[in-house]
Image (spheres, grey):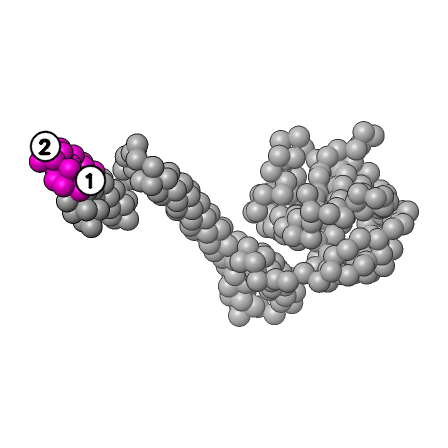
């Protein structure tokens, strides 16, 4: 306003026509500024309405494009934000569906042994046979294992576990993992062969859980035979290979072997399909990878690598 009055005064001081010219120029400039601001606020009001519709669940709304500098930048950033929020919403919906499926699977898995327990309790009331009691103990142990594994999986999914970072020698790890299976392997006529060197950085307690599940899978699916466990270490990673001399893995199972609640074609009736899934979750959480394949001369082979830097 001050510049407008100063220019108008100077124009009329020079000549009346000069003053009128300055007045007309200032008037045009004022009309342009007012029109530009009105258009700007109209665009902002339109953008606000679109954002409000998006917040109320309208998935078809796409933010309009604007040519003005500041509004164009704001529109681009808001479009990125909306796209990210929609992506997060889709992900949450998928996780919701996965959770519902998991709960249904868990319910089914727990219902089966509990139904068996109830039937055996009826048999106990009707006679003096001790076999149902032993079967009840077996089913209760199965429920205990299932619930414990599911709780561990839930904690891993929720990200509430802090893994310790300690140097673990493969020799020490496998010695602790194999201790509970020594008698079982002897009864099944299985022989353990170890060639262990090197170490890795991880959590010993959770690593025992992971490798125990992998080794138990080999023991359960192999009759009389040999179990080979070898390790090595280089500048990039530490590797542990577990293989057996059993019948190997079915080709159709390889793609789904680590899926939660997946039971392979040769799975036993007692299998719940959670051991290998839990093992992979633990290994990946410690900056590792696990791969399952059939060995060239027969048998299943699991290769685990712990990388020394984030991959």
Q: Which residue is drawn at the image coordinates 31% and 40% (left, top)? A: 71
| Residue under the image location 83 percent in, 44 percent down | 235
Spatial CA distance of label 1 from label 2 is 24 Å
As rendered, which of 52 and 109 lies closer to the eye?
A: 52
Residue drawn at x 63%, y 50% is 281
Query: Along the line of sight, which residue is nearer the eye, 117 or 297?
Result: 297
Q: In this picture, which residue range is highlighted in magenta?
A: 10-36
- Badge count: 2
Looking at the rendering, which quadrant does residue 303 occupy?
Answer: top right
Q: Secondary structure at mark 2?
A: helix
Answer few, some or many: residues within 10 Å of disc 2's Cα (few below 14, many 20 plus, some between 14 and 19): few
Q: What percent of the width, then of the height, locates residue 169?
A: 85, 56
Q: Is residue 24 visible?
A: no
Our reading of the magenta stretch's main secondary structure is helix
Answer few, some or many: residues within 10 Å of disc 1's Cα (few below 14, many 20 plus, some between 14 and 19).
few
Residue at the location (73% across, 47% down)?
309
Determine which residue is flagged by label 1. Answer: 33
Whether residue 26 is in magenta: the answer is: yes
Tell me the SS state at disc 1.
Answer: helix
Q: Are marks 1 and 2 in contact (CB under 8 Å)?
A: no
- Image coordinates for residue 227, horizontal then vertical, percent: 84, 45
Residue 17, disc: 2
In the picture, which quadrant includes the C terminus? top right
187 relative position to 49: left or right? right
Q: Is residue 24 left or right of residue 105?
A: left
């Amino acid at each position: 306003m001050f510049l407008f009055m100063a220019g108008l005064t100077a124009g009329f001081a020079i000549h009346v026509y000069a003053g009128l010219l300055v007045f007309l120029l200032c008037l045009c400039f004022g009309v342009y500024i007012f029109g530009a601001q009105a258009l700007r606020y109209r665009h902002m009001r339109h953008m606000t309405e679109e954002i409000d519709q998006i917040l109320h669940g309208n998935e078809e709304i796409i933010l309009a494009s604007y040519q003005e500098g500041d509004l164009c930048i704001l529109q681009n950033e808001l479009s990125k934000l909306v796209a990210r929020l929609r992506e997060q919403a889709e992900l949450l919906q998928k996780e919701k569906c996965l959770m519902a499926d998991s709960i249904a699977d868990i319910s089914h898995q727990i219902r089966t042994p509990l139904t068996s327990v109830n039937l055996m309790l009826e048999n106990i009331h009707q006679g003096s046979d001790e076999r149902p009691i032993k079967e009840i103990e077996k089913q209760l142990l199965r429920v205990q294992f299932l619930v414990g594994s599911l709780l561990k999986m839930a904690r891993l999914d929720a990200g509430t576990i802090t893994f310790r970072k300690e140097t673990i020698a493969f020799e020490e790890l496998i010695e602790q993992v194999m201790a509970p299976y020594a008698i079982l392997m002897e009864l099944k006529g299985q022989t353990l062969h170890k060639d262990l060197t090197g170490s890795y950085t991880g959590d010993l307690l959770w690593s025992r859980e992971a490798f125990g599940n992998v080794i138990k899978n080999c023991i359960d699916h192999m009759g009389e035979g040999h179990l080979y466990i070898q390790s090595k270490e280089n500048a990039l990673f530490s590797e542990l290979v577990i293989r057996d001399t059993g019948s190997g893995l079915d080709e159709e199972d390889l793609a789904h072997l680590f899926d939660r609640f997946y039971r392979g074609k040769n799975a036993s009736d007692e299998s719940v399909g959670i051991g290998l899934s839990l093992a992979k979750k633990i290994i990946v959480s410690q900056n590792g990878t696990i791969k399952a394949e059939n060995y060239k001369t027969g048998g299943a082979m699991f290769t685990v690598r712990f990388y020394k830097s984030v991959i």
